[in-house]
Amino acid sequence: MSFLKRLFGGGGGAAEPAAAAVAKEIEYKGFSIKAMPYKEGGQFQTCGVVSKDVGGEVKEHKFIRADRFAALDDAVEVSLTKGRQLVDEQGERMFA
């Protein structure tokens, strides 16, 4: 799973692509959701980070889904939808 290392800061060789950049960020029910799709196999993989300030500390939950899209905009929208779904289903429990 070397793509996970590349995505979240591991590895770092010159031949490896840079970590995914934040394509779009939204606020939802007190959480910050960042869509960070990355290119894998010629398509964009659904990926993002849900974060929230809890007791003065920023907690993060990174997620990657199997969904892939030809268009970056589609991957961004699905990443944001998945982030909202995580907030609705788990709330702050995702940081436990």
Image (cartoon, helix red, strand yellow):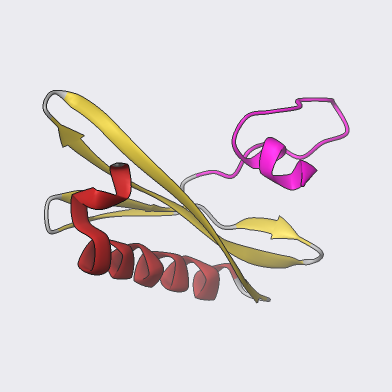
Where is residue 10? Give x, y as percent: 69, 28
Q: Quadrant of residue 43?
A: bottom right
> On the rendered structure, is 25 left or right of 54?
right
Give the vertical position of 35 relative to 53 (above or below): below
Residue occupying image coordinates x 25% and y 68%: 89
Residue occupying image coordinates x 52% and y 76%: 74
Give the vertical position of 47 relative to 59 (above or below): below
Nearest to the observer: residue 60 or residue 38:
60
Q: Quadrant of residue 67?
A: bottom right
Nearest to the observer: residue 21 or residue 81:
81
Q: Is residue 75 highlighted in magenta?
A: no
Q: Is residue 12 highlighted in magenta?
A: yes
Q: Quadrant of residue 55?
A: top left
In the picture, the quarter occupied by the C terminus is: top left
Nearest to the observer: residue 77 or residue 7:
7
Give the vertical position of 77 relative to 54 (above or below): below
Q: Please indicate, yes or no, whether residue 32 appears anywhere in the rendered image.
A: no
Q: Please indicate, yes or no, whether residue 21 appears anywhere in the rendered image.
A: yes
Where is residue 38? Give x, y as percent: 63, 54
Residue occupying image coordinates x 18% and y 34%: 53
> On the rendered structure, is 27 left or right of 13?
left
> On the rendered structure, is 24 left or right of 44?
left
Dominant secondary-structure state across the stretch colored magenta: loop
Q: How many marks?
A: 0
Q: Which residues are magenta?
A: 1-21
Residue occupying image coordinates x 81% and y 64%: 41
